[in-house]
Structures are given as structure tokens and as C-alpha cells.
Amino acid sequence: MNPQLLTDLTVSACLGALIGSIRQWSDQTKKPEDRGVDFGGVRTHTLWGVLGFLGGTLTEKAPFLLPVIIGSVAAQQIAIRWRNPVPSHPGGTSFAAMLLTLLAGVLMAWDSTRIAVVLTMFTLVVLGTKQPLHAWTRNFTTEDVRAVLQFVAITGVILPLVPNEAMGPFNGFNPYSTWLMVVLISGVGLVGYAAMRLLGTKSGIVVTSLLGGLASSTATTLAFSRRSREDPELSIHYAFAISTACTVMVPRVIAIVAVLNPSLAWATALPLAAMTLPALGFAGWYAWRPTTEMNLSAPAMSNPLSLRTSIKFALLYALFAFLVKAATQLDWQQGLLPLSFVSGLTDMDAIALSMADNQKSGTVGLELAAKAVVMGAVANALLKAGMAAALGSPGLRRPVVGVLVATALIGGVAIAVM
């Protein structure tokens, strides 16, 4: 017998056995009254893998064999479902696992070993995460579902429809580029919010502040500042959370800029990293100070993604993109730094992305673009300091304002020496 043929047959059987083991484990973890009929475990899926391999191997000699195998196995599954009560019938996952097991065997016969292994691993992951996924989705709120649908609309419906051409005075407005930035920022915010919802606000102040900074450092600052008024004795913990969230904004901005313009990301990396030193120093003090262990519940924060927010960001980005174009066309580039400061007081992402786009197209020089991004970060730090001072408790005000003002000063020095 051909050794390679025997090896491929064995691998097909093993791939089927792996899928079957996950299916069998899933059934065994159910309560006895919920198990119903056995629709295939290790042995059944092993044989399905072998059948798929044989059907694929004999395709040239018996082209009808593979369709017959697939049809017969499918008919058997349908018959089992038909004969048994509704609570015990297999769902679409069981049927898909059967077809994928057969397909893995077929791919092995067609010398597509890598694809067969990747397909099997993917199937194992999907089947193995059934219970965690069900537990997670049970906690979905109407707001969560709406957020996902809005992101789908923002990405898959609106983006392909907007025109991709420069228009308006100075050719300063491109609808497609503007909405692409909305997709990028909305995606980052949604990932942070989804991680927070997955871990829950009980996961601890550190994790929540890190993910809150990824989703929206502004929303995090507002939430923790208001919470400090309700629990003034915990103000130092909430101050740490705010400074951490504002620090996360730095690598977040660098990563977003790097997607569009790696050169600008490198140019801003050092000054922006220097701006994190006050927050890192405060975090070091917070970690080493003598205190009792506390597991704080972070305040619940609303989803930062909404269609209204996306439209506001699109308008803001389009406005600053146009003003940058106008300033460069009218040879008023010295006005870009004041413009960046104003932008940072409203939205740090808008000016960062605008500079990344304009520098890449050659409209703005690299040095000036880097200064503009840092200037936006300076203004944003001062904005957060003002929020904490206006809304926070006295115990939160002092450390947060101190950290963020020091952050802004370092950014100002960085701009002067750049």
C-alpha cells in the first residue's frame, strides 16, 4: 500500500476524531435531560473523515462517489432529526460540523493538508466556544445590539456608497476618506467597549481604565470624575483610573496614525511617549504605596459608538481637513498649530488623522505635522484636566490636574525642541 496514502488516511481520521471529541465533550457537559439523541461523537466523526478522504481519493475513478457520500450522511442526519422530538434534534452547528469533517477528509485526499488542518482548527475553536459565547450573548443589551448594527451600517452600507473624489474649495473634502476615518475610529472604540462588556465592570479598576482609554478616554474621565463625588474616599483610585485612561490614549493615537502614515507615527512616538511620564510616575506611586487590597467596581460607561457620534466626528474631521488644506494653499502654515490646539480641545483623533493624511499626500511637512499632533495631545490633556477639576472631588482634582498639566507642559517643551 502507498505509504503516503496511508498517512493521509490516518490524518483524515485524526482530524475527524478531533472534531468529534469536541462534539462529544459538548454533549457530555449538558444535563442528562438535555442531551437527547447522540448525533455523533469521536467514532462517528472519525469515520466521516475517512469517508470524505475516500470520496476525494476516488473522484477520478468514481466521480459519483463523493456526492453520494455527502448526500447519504446528510440524509441520515435529516432522518434522525425527523424521527426524534424537537428538543433533541441537532442544530445547524451539528450539521455544519458533519460537512466540515467530510470536507477535511476530501482536502487531505486532494493534497491540501494545510487547508484541512486550518479548517479543522477553526472548527474546533468555533465548537469549543459555544458555551462561553452563549453566556456572553445572554448579557447583551439593546444598546449593544444597536451598536453592532450601527457599525455594520457605518462600514458595510455607507462606506461603499460615498464618492471617492476630492471636491469643494481647495479640493479639501473627500467623502470617502472622511467616512473611512469614521470607520477606523468607530472600530477602535467598539473593540474597547466590547472588551469592557465582556470582562465586566467588576474586573477591576486597572482593566476597566485601560479598556476605557481604548474606547474613549473622554468618557472615562467623565465617568470616574462624577463617581469620585459619590465615593470621595475612593478618589485616589479614580484618579489613577483617569490618568491611566489618558495615558492609553497615547499608544492608541500612535497606532491609529501608523495605519495611515508610519513615518508620522515614528516622528510623534518619542514626544508622545515623553508625555506619558507623569502618569507613569503616578502609577508607580499608586502601585507601591501602602494600602489594603481593594476590588473596586468601576462605573458603567455607555457605548461610545452611535450614528450621531459618527456623524459629528465626520463633520469635525471634514472641517479640520478643509482648514488644513486651506491653510497650506494660502501659505498660512503657521496657523496649523493653533488649529491643532482647538481640535485637541474637541477631538484628538480628528487632527491626528488629518495630519496623517495630509502629510502622506505631501500637503504638510513631516516636522510640522508631528508638532500639530503633539499640540493636539497637549490641548486634549488640558481639556481632561479641566473636566476633572470641574466635576471631580477635591481628592481626585489634585492628582489628576497635576498629572495632566505636567503632561501638557512636557508636550509643550517637546514642540519647542522638535
Image (cartoon, grey):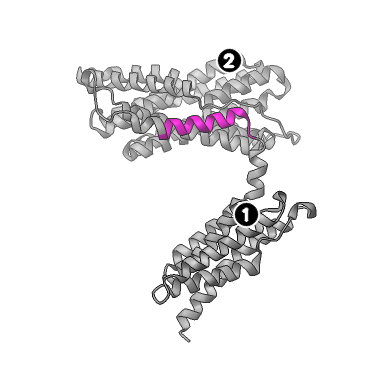
| Mark closer to the observer (2, 1) | 1
Quarter of the figure with the C terminus? top left
Membership of 147 in magenta stretch: yes
Question: Does residue 33 appear to the left or right of 368 in the view shown?
Answer: right
Place residue 95 in its image quadrant: bottom right
* Residue 193, percent from left and from top: 56, 33
* Residue 258, picture quadrant: top left
Q: Local crowd at mark 2 within 10 Å, few (<14), some, or many (≥20)?
A: some
The residue tagged with tag 1: helix, strand or loop? helix
Q: Nearer the viewer, residue 70 or 209?
A: 70
Which residue is tagged 2?
A: 389
299 left or right, relative to 182: right
The residues colored magenta run 140-156
Residue at the image position 31 percent from the left and 31 percent from the top: 357
Residue located farthest toward the top when viewing the structure as drawn: 390
Residue at the image point whose x is 74% and y is 55% from the top = 35
Q: Is residue 204 visible?
A: yes
Residue 333 screen position, x and y as percent: 25, 20
Q: Nearer the viewer, residue 134 or 98?
A: 98
Residue at (58% x, 12% y) in the render: 390
In this view, the residue in front, 361 or 375, is: 361
Q: Residue furthest bottom?
A: 1
Q: Amino acid type of disc 1?
A: Gly
Residue 367 visible, this angle: no
Q: Is residue 112 left or right of residue 335?
A: right
Identify the secondary structure beneath mark 2.
helix
Residue 14 bears which disc, if any?
none
Q: Taking 117 as reference, is 417 above or below it?
A: above
Q: Position of residue 74 (x, y in %)?
A: 56, 61
Q: Which mark is residue 128?
A: 1
Give the mark nearest the N terminus, 2 or 1: 1
